[in-house]
Image (cartoon, rainbow, N blue to C red):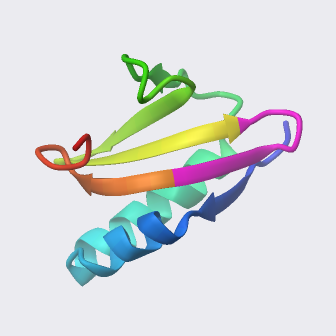
Amino acid sequence: MKAYQVSLTSEAQSDLRGIASATRTRLLDKLEWIGENAELIQHQALQGDEWKGCYKYRVGDYRIIYRMEHARTKLIVLKVGHRREVYK
């Protein structure tokens, strides 16, 4: 089982900076876990043309929106935010 390298876009980094410290730590820990267990997780695909090829992962009231590059074993985090606002 290969671990996926997790990388954050500049938008995802900005999103994380705006989140409270305790929640941010929880989200970063979960991102690390997702990277280590990417081949074991059943990923939830997003619907719609705008989100084609993207997946979501729930962490409490927050969502992590990401894309996977299987050939490069890379997980690219596009957005992180509260479920009310992350899809806008």
Q: Position of residue 32 (x, y in %)?
A: 58, 59
> Is residue 46 within the magenta segment?
no
What is the quadrant of the C terminus in the image? top left
Closest to the observer, 76 or 31: 76
Task: Please identify the residue farthest to the front as the structure is shown.
Answer: 49
Q: Position of residue 87 (x, y in %)?
A: 26, 40
The quarter of the displayed image where residue 13 is located: bottom left
Direction from residue 17 to residue 10 in the image, left or right: right
Residue at 88% from the left image edge and 35% from the top image edge? 71
Look at the picture and state if 37 lies above or below 16: above
What is the quadrant of the N terminus in the image? top right
Closest to the observer, 28 or 84: 84
Look at the picture and state if 18 lies above or below 80: below
Residue at 44% from the left image edge and 64% from the top image edge? 12
Give the magenta range. Answer: 69-77
Residue at 20% from the left image edge and 78% from the top image edge? 20
> Is residue 70 within the magenta segment?
yes
Q: Position of residue 25 (x, y in %)?
A: 37, 74
Residue at 57% from the left image edge and 28% from the top image edge? 41
